[in-house]
C-alpha cells in the first residue's frame, strides 16, 4: 500500500513505478500512456496474465487528456450499446480503489442533467426510460427536486433558460484523475509491464497486413500486437499506417476556481446552456463546456468559449458570480461523426484501435481497458466493444449519441 | 481574441465566424457509381492533419459568405484566407513546412 497512512495522500508518482529503458521486443505494445493505455495494460496483466507489455508515452504518464479532464463519471447514455459499456465501466469504478489498492477519491455524488425546454424534457424522460430498461439507475426529477438535490441552482422561472427538471443518476460522480492514472500505472508496473515515458512513436515497420514493430524516439521496438490508445493524436498514427479513421481533433477546455467552502453537493450538467460544474474534493469549482469549433492540436482553445461558459454558469449558479478563475487549460479530443468511440479491429491483423472517445472517455477508463485487453488477448472483441467498430461508418450501424444522450462528457 | 481575415470584410474577431471543416473536398463526380465504402468516405471521413491544412469558414454575423483558410492546427495560426474558387496558396512558398507535427 503506497499511502502515507496519516494523510491518505499517495506517494510521489516518481516512486510508484520503474522507469525502464525499452526492450527490443514485446508481445504487446500500447501507444499512449493515458488512462486507456494504462487500464488496458492493467487488465492485460490482471485478467489475462499477459505481462510482456510496453506502454509507450511520448510525454509523461497521464500528461494528455487523462489529467486534463473534469472527471465526470456516469453511465446514463441513451442507446443500449453505450449504456452497456459505460455501465460496465461504472461498475468497475465502484471497486477500482480496492482493485488498485490505491486511493482514487471516487465519489458517487450523483449527476443532474438539466432540461430547459419541452423538447429537453421529452428527450430526458425518454432517456430515463431507456436507462431503467438497461439496468442503469436513473430518475426524472422536477424543478423542486432539482432545488432539493442542489440548492444553489437557480430554479427561478424568470431566467433565460428556466430549469424544467432534470435526469438524475445517483451512482454517477467524480474521481481524482491523476490518482487513477498513478494507481493503474503502479499495478501495471508491479505486474512487470514496462511504462516507458519520453518515447514518441514516429512510425511503423510492416510486413503485409501485420505491423512488426514501432519506430520511436528511443529506437525501434518489435511487437507481436499493437494497440493504439493515443486519443487526440490517433490520426497522426493511422496516417502513418495508411488507413483512414473518421476523427476530427478539437480543443476542449476546462477551468477551476479558487478553493471554496463546500457549496455544490452533486454534479450539474446543462447541454442547452453549455456548462457543467462539480466541486472537487479540495474545494475548487470544476467547470467545462463544449469543444472549440475548429480542429486544433494546440492543447488550448479560444477565450470566447470560456467567456460563454462563465456566463452560463453564473446564470445557473448566481452564487458563483464572485468566484475567481484560478486556472484554465485545454486538451485535444478526438471526435467521431456519431459521438461514439471506435474500439476494435483495423485493416492490420495485429493492430487494435481505441479512439474517438472525444469529450467523454475518462468515465470509460476501466471499462475500455477491460474490453480492449480482452480483444487483444483473445483476438475477438468483447461483447461490450463489439458494436463500436471502424466499419460501422460504412455499414451504417452508427451508435448515434449526438443529442441522444446527455452527450457532453 | 484571435482575428480572422474575412476576404470581403477584413479582420474580425473569431466569435463572428463559424467553422466548416476541411476545404476542397469535391462532391463525387458520378455519385451513383460510388460503392458504400466510397460514400462512407465522402460523408464521414476527413483529413485530421496536425500541421498546415486548408479549411472552410463562414462569416456568420456579417457578410455570411463562405471562404477558405490555411491554418496550422498545431499553433492555430492563420497563414492565409482566400475566396472560394481561388486556388489554395502555395504553402511551401510561405515557408510553413507543411506536414504533421
Ligand atoms: C478539458 C477536458 C474535459 C474532459 N472532461 C471529461 C469528463 O468530465 N468525463 C469524461 O468521461 N471524459 C472527459 N474528457 C475526455 C477524456 O479526458 C478522454 O476521453 C480520455 O482521457 C481519453 O483517453 P486517455 O486517458 O487514454 O487519453 P490521453 O490521456 O490523452 O492519452 C493519450 C496519450 O497518448 C500519448 N500519445 C499520443 N501520440 C503518441 C505517440 N505518437 N507516441 C507515444 N505517445 C503518444 C499522449 O501523449 C497521451 O498521453 C475530457 C477531456 C478534456 C480535454
Ligand atoms: Zn465577411
Image: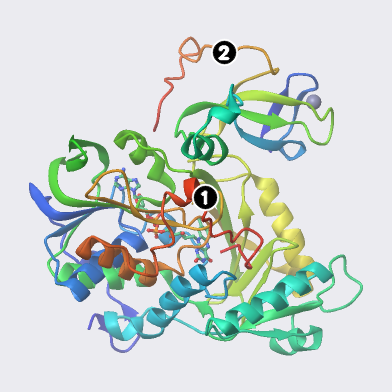
Is B11 left, or right, of B62 in this rendering? Answer: left
Displayed quadrant of residue A54: bottom left
Residue A184 appears anywhere in the view: yes
For the point 30% across and 56% down, the residue is A33
The mark closer to the camera, 1 or 2, is: 1
Residue lying at the far top in this picture: please name it: B93
Quadrant housing the N terminus of chain A = bottom left
Residue B6 position, x and y percent, is: 74, 24
Tag shown at residue A336: 1
Is A210 located above or below residue B11 in the figure?
below
Residue tagged 2: B89
Are both tags, 1 and 2, on one chain? no
In this rendered view, identify the residue nearer to me: A64 or A127.
Answer: A127
Residue lying at the far left in this picture: please name it: A24
Q: CA distance from mark 1 to mark 2?
A: 29 Å
Is A185 left, or right, of A398 in this rendering? Answer: left
Residue lying at the far front in this picture: please name it: B32
Displayed quadrant of residue A96: bottom left
For the point 11% across and 61% down, the residue is A52
Q: Chain of mark 2?
A: B
Amino acid at each position: 500500500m503506497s499511502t502515507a497512512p496519516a494523510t491518505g495522500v499517495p506517494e510521489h508518482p516518481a516512486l510508484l513505478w520503474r522507469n525502464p529503458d525499452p526492450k527490443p521486443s514485446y508481445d504487446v505494445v500500447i501507444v499512449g500512456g493515458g488512462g486507456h493505455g494504462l487500464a488496458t495494460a492493467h487488465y492485460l496483466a490482471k485478467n489475462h496474465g499477459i505481462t510482456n507489455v510496453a506502454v509507450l508515452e511520448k510525454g509523461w504518464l497521464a500528461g494528455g487528456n487523462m489529467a486534463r479532464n473534469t472527471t465526470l463519471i456516469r453511465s446514463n447514455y441513451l442507446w443500449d450499446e453505450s449504456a452497456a459499456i459505460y455501465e460496465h465501466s461504472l461498475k468497475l469504478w465502484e471497486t477500482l480503489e480496492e482493485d488498485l489498492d490505491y486511493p482514487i477519491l471516487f465519489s458517487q455524488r450523483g449527476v443532474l442533467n438539466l432540461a430547459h425546454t419541452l423538447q429537453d424534457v421529452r428527450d430526458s424522460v425518454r432517456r430515463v426510460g431507456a436507462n431503467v430498461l438497461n439496468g442503469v439507475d436513473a430518475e426524472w426529477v422536477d424543478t423542486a427536486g432539482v432545488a432539493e438535490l442542489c440548492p444553489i441552482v437557480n430554479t427561478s422561472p424568470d431566467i433565460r433558460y428556466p430549469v424544467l427538471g432534470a435526469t438524475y443518476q445517483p451512482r454517477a460522480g467524480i474521481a481524482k484523475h491523476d490518482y487513477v492514472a498513478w494507481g493503474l500505472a503502479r499495478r501495471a508496473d508491479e505486474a512487470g509491464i514496462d511504462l516507458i515515458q519520453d518515447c514518441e512513436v514516429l512510425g511503423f515497420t510492416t510486413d503485409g497486413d501485420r505491423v512488426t514493430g514501432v519506430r520511436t524516439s528511443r529506437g525501434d521496438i518489435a511487437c507481436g500486437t499493437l494497440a493504439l490508445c493515443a486519443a487526440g493524436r490517433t490520426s497522426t498514427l493511422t496516417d502513418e499506417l495508411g488507413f483512414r479513421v473518421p476523427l476530427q481533433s478539437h480543443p476542449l477546455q476546462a477551468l477551476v476556481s479558487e478553493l471554496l467552502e463546500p457549496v455544490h453537493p452533486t454534479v450539474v450538467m446543462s447541454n442547452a446552456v453549455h456548462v457543467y460544474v462539480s466541486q472537487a474534493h479540495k474545494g475548487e469549482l470544476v467547470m467545462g463546456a463544449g469543444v472549440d469549433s475548429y480542429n486544433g492540436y494546440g492543447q488550448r482553445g479560444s477565450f470566447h468559449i470560456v467567456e460563454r461558459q462563465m456566463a452560463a454558469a453564473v446564470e445557473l449558479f448566481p452564487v458563483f458570480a464572485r468566484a475567481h478563475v484560478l486556472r484554465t487549460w485545454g486538451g485535444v479530443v478526438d471526435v467521431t461523426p456519431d459521438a461514439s468511440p471506435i474500439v476494435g479491429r483495423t485493416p492490420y491483423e495485429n493492430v487494435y484501435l481505441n479512439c474517438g472517445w472525444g469529450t467523454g472517455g475518462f468515465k470509460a477508463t476501466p471499462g475500455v481497458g477491460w474490453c480492449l485487453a480482452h480483444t487483444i488477448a483473445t483476438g475477438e472483441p468483447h461483447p461490450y466493444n463489439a458494436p463500436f467498430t471502424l466499419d460501422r461508418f460504412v455499414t451504417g450501424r452508427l451508435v448515434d449519441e449526438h443529442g441522444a444522450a446527455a452527450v457532453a462528457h | 481574441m484571435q482575428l480572422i481575415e474575412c476576404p470581403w470584410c477584413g479582420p474580425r474577431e473569431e466569435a463572428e465566424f463559424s467553422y466548416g471543416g476541411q476545404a476542397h473536398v469535391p462532391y463525387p463526380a458520378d455519385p451513383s457509381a460510388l460503392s458504400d465504402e466510397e460514400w462512407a468516405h465522402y460523408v464521414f471521413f476527413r483529413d485530421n492533419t496536425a500541421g498546415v491544412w486548408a479549411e472552410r469558414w463562414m462569416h456568420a454575423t456579417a457578410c455570411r459568405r463562405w471562404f477558405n483558410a490555411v491554418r496550422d492546427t498545431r499553433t492555430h495560426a492563420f497563414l492565409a484566407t482566400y475566396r472560394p474558387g481561388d486556388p489554395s496558396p502555395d504553402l511551401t512558398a510561405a515557408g510553413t513546412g507543411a506536414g504533421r507535427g
